[in-house]
Image: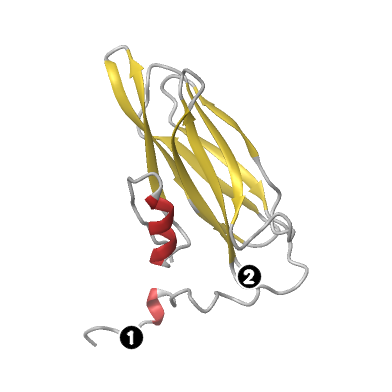
Amino acid sequence: MNCIILGKCRWASLIVARAALLLPLAITAGSADHADAKGPAKVYVFVDSTATDPGDIATFGVRLSKATSRRVTVDYTTFDWEATVADGDYLPEWGTLTFAPGETYKTVTVQTLPDEFPEFWEDFGLWAAIVNRDGSIGYSNRGSCTIFGELGAPWWYPPPVEEYPPVNP
């Protein structure tokens, strides 16, 4: 099941996506002002969430809402949720993406690690922020990765839609 949740509040989007409990997939947005030849323009950064099996590569899509005539840099880093680096669930990643003029999409890959013992599904996240021309951090965004576990979904995950009884049989 692929569920998409949209949000525009840079801090609340993580809470909304998490509280909906309809993950594994969510798209949220943050923005920053970047002036181009035509004047100020609002540019949003999006982080697409993903899901993977333990030991596989998680691929996050990081994209801008529109192309600009200037270079845009985006800093990123992984962060723990139920899945943690300390527990050996994934390898941390951090760095900077540079979007050339006209470019709007890049990916960040994160290596997840095989489970030593059976586990429930776990999540970790990728945080990304536009770096303003003066070096300050602009608006940010987060996406999540669900690592599927051998024990299935935790008790608080809703069943897949096909398991619900029909509304009007």
Residue at image coords 31%, 28%: 42
Q: Image quadrant for the C terminus?
A: bottom left
Q: Label for residue 55?
A: none
Q: Position of residue 144 (x, y in %)?
A: 52, 54
Q: Position of residue 127 (x, y in %)?
A: 53, 43
**Outermost residue toward the right?**
116
Residue at image coords 55%, 75%: 154
**Outermost residue toward the left?**
168
Circle 2 or circle 1, nearest the eye:
2
Q: Which of 147 and 35 is in front in this view?
A: 35
Say above or below: 32 vs 120.
above
Left or right side of 79 for 14: left
Say above or below: 74 vs 11.
above
Say above or below: 110 vs 113.
above
Q: Please count the marks in the image.
A: 2
Q: Is mark 1 on a helix, strand or loop?
A: loop
Q: What residue would you read off at disc 1?
A: 165
* Residue type for callout 1: Pro
Q: Image quadrant for the N terminus?
A: bottom left
Residue at image coords 39%, 39%: 30
Left or right side of 36 for 125: right
Report the colour scheme.
secondary structure
Q: What residue would you read off at disc 2?
A: 149
Q: What element carries label 2?
A: loop
Q: Measure how far apart labels 2 and 1 are at the Cα level.
A: 26 Å
Q: Quadrant of residue 22?
A: bottom left
Question: Are discs 2 and 1 less than 8 Å apart at CB?
Answer: no
Of marks 2 and 1, which one's residue comes earlier in the chain? 2
**Outermost residue toward the top?**
37
Q: In which quarter of the image is residue 123?
A: bottom right
Left or right side of 156 for 150: right
* Residue type for callout 2: Gly
